[in-house]
Amino acid sequence: MVFTAVWLTSVVAWGQPVHDTAPGAAPEDGSEPIDVTVDEGEEDGGDGSEPIDVTVDEGEEDGGDGSEPIDVTVDDPEPAAPDDPAPQAPAPEPPAPQAPAPEPPAPAEPGDATPAAPAPRGDDAEVDLTGDAPPPPDPNAEEETSWLDAPATRRSGFTFGILLGSLMGNVEGYPNDALKIDRDAFRTNTGFSGGGFGHAFIGVTFTDWIGFGIGGGYGALVSDDHETRSLAIDFRIDAWPFYGLGGVGEDLGINFTAGLGASNTTLNEGDDTRVVDGALTSHVATGVFWEPIQLWRINMGPFASFDAQFSQSVFQGSAWIGWRTVLYSGPSRDEEPEGDTEVSSR
């Protein structure tokens, strides 16, 4: 800034030499100082200018140095803005508005009913110990249970049974010879035949409505020209699915047997030649029975069943109708079961 003022002063002084002097000091050659003012902005409410002493030599005049003070004012230019201003940090976002705090409930006036607080849940629940304790269960009260869980009243325990009846059926097959099976020249059909069959079994009856056992039987069928003898060893299931209905349903049951057997057919003329030889056969049977008669622990009643024995060389189908007698080691109708229990028919 000083050099700019000097340069302007030199131009005004028409190229005369200019000497810088300290403020308020006389130049070395005895010339008078020229007062130059540089404007640096207002200060303290004024024009903000400060005097700068500049001496302009105008040559000697009338025996002196001929210098005259020249008042020059230089405006201080505003500093230029930087090309790349430094990035400023973004202004912080204003905080989210807060929900107004709920107003406290107004105090209840005397005489107003206070609403009940909600019942606590989970671990916060409190046990009311101020009331009377519930009465203890009555040991003499009858307990109502499902018929599936009730103690047996009709049958249970070890079981031994005998079934005897009439057998009606038909046998068809071949000799047990690979060269004769499925050849019409060796095929035999006994036609309708009648006879009898007996079966005995032992087992366990778990409750009034289910039991298991194993048994075996032997029977015969006779026609005009043929006689067939058969036997079987089976596993059996006896069930009373309608027991829960009460009445007749308590003694009405079904059975299913499956096992192995044998069936052979010969001529009635006394010839022991087997015209049908089933060898080892499969045996299945299913039927229904009813045990309405009960004497002590013996249950009796009629039954009807359908039996089938079959192998590669024979098929024997028969219907069996007879009488069933079974001994149970469990309670009978006249005996009280353990504990007084009311049975529901659910």
Image: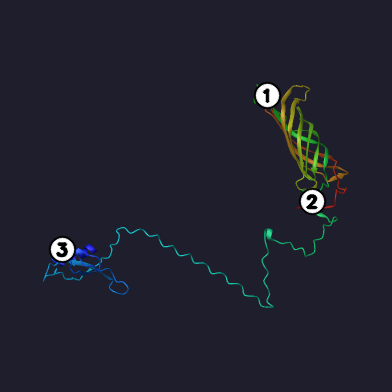
Reading the chain from its start, which is encountered first: label 1 or label 2?
1
Residue 186, numbered circle: 1
Reading the chain from its start, which is encountered first: label 3 or label 1?
3
| Amino acid carrying mark 2 in the image | Gly
Residue denoted by label 2: 246
Label 1 neighbourhood size at 10 Å, few (<14), some (14-19), many (20+)? some
| Amino acid carrying mark 1 in the image | Phe
Q: Nearer the viewer, mark 1 or mark 2?
A: 2
Between the residue at mark 1 and the residue at mark 2, the CA separation in whole angstroms equals: 54 Å
Residue 25, numbered circle: none
Viewer-closest of 142 and 293 = 142
Quadrant location, the N terminus: bottom left
Dot 3: element: loop
Where, by quadrant of the figure, is residue 187 drawn? Answer: top right
Between the residue at mark 3 and the residue at mark 2, the CA separation in whole angstroms equals: 145 Å
Please state the horizontal and vertical placement of residue 146, each as a whole percent of the image: 77, 51
Label 3 neighbourhood size at 10 Å, few (<14), some (14-19), many (20+)? few
Residue 10 appears left or right of 91: left
Q: Is residue 203 visible?
A: yes
Dot 2: element: loop
Dot 1: element: helix
Q: Nearer the viewer, mark 3 or mark 2?
A: 3
Between the residue at mark 3 and the residue at mark 1, the CA separation in whole angstroms equals: 159 Å
| Amino acid carrying mark 3 in the image | Pro
